[in-house]
Image (spheres, helix red, strand yellow):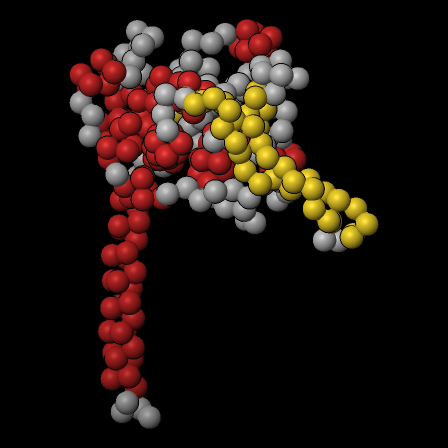
Amino acid sequence: MKKIILSLLASLALVGPAAASSEGPAWDKFPAGRVTDLAAVQNGAKLFANYCLNCHAAAFMRYNRLRDIGLTEEQIKDNLIFSGAKVGETMKTALDPKDAKDWFGGVPPDLTLIARSRSDSAKGTGADYVYTYLRSYYRDDTKATGWNNTVFPGVGMPNVLWELQGQQKPIYVEEKDPHDKTKTVHIFKGFEQIRPGTLSTADFNTATADLVAYLQWMAEPNQTSRVRLGVWVLIFLFGFTLVAWRLNAAYWKDIK
């Protein structure tokens, strides 16, 4: 339990206080159906191993747990493990913490529970946040990494998916402040593609959804079974309530 709490606290590094508030661009809705699509989750696991594990760890997930999404140990060894780790080991990163601080200004957070820790009651779920965040990078030559993010301004993490996504710039328009008509505010209206990536915009959105689906599955591998079991529990309780109600009426009918 202590490790889980520490992981949740560490994951706060992914977003600052400003990003965690209800201000800023609205979050796009993550296509939740991807979590129950094993092919999508498997593709997300591949993207996670190729693009995320270089810097981020998933210290509470073992490689062999990926058998739950339909992968064999051989597939895990051949396609998802690049560090010489054993299938029974946890997903650790080879990035040295000292180098991380020098390069990014801090140690990248563990991602095991990231999809559960970033929810906002006013804007959406943690999956919505991560789905929007990963698709909101834009070129910014004023930053050391050359990248910035509309969801997390001043982000230290570069756009690791830029080859797939390409490069884009945000579009802002000036409008009257609805609270003070004497002032104008910059309103975010979306992105303009300035250099294409290896994937089309639609395909990149799908790939990002697959990655987020894996992150959401990893945060709670038993969520599908939990939901299925919960339905049967509610059905049982409903039936039991009817039986108890009729029994209660039968017991008390003569007394009344």
**Which residue is at a point 27% across and 91% down the rendered structure image?**
254
The spot of residue 44 in percent (x, y) is: 33, 28
Residue 42's place in the image compared with 108, above or below, is below
Residue 126 seen in the figure: no
Rendered image quadrant of residue 240: bottom left
Quarter that holds the N terminus: top left
Residue at image point 56% right, 49% down:
122
Where is residue 21, by image quadrant? Answer: top right
Left or right? Give the position of 125 relative to 144: left
Asked whether 18 or 139 is in front, the reply is 139
Of residues 118 and 183, the one nearer the viewer is 183
Numbered disc total = 0
Question: Would residue 127 be found to the left or right of residue 68 on screen?
Answer: right
Quarter of the C terminus within the rendering:
bottom left
Closer to us: 204 or 151 = 204
Q: Can residue 74 be seen in this view?
A: yes
In the displayed structure, would residue 138 be above or below residue 209? above
Q: Position of residue 58 (x, y in %)?
A: 41, 22
- Left or right of 185 on screen, residue 58: left
Q: Is residue 180 left or right of residue 53?
A: right
Q: Which residue is drawn at the image coordinates 25% and 79% (left, top)?
A: 246
Residue in the picture at 34% in, 23% down:
47
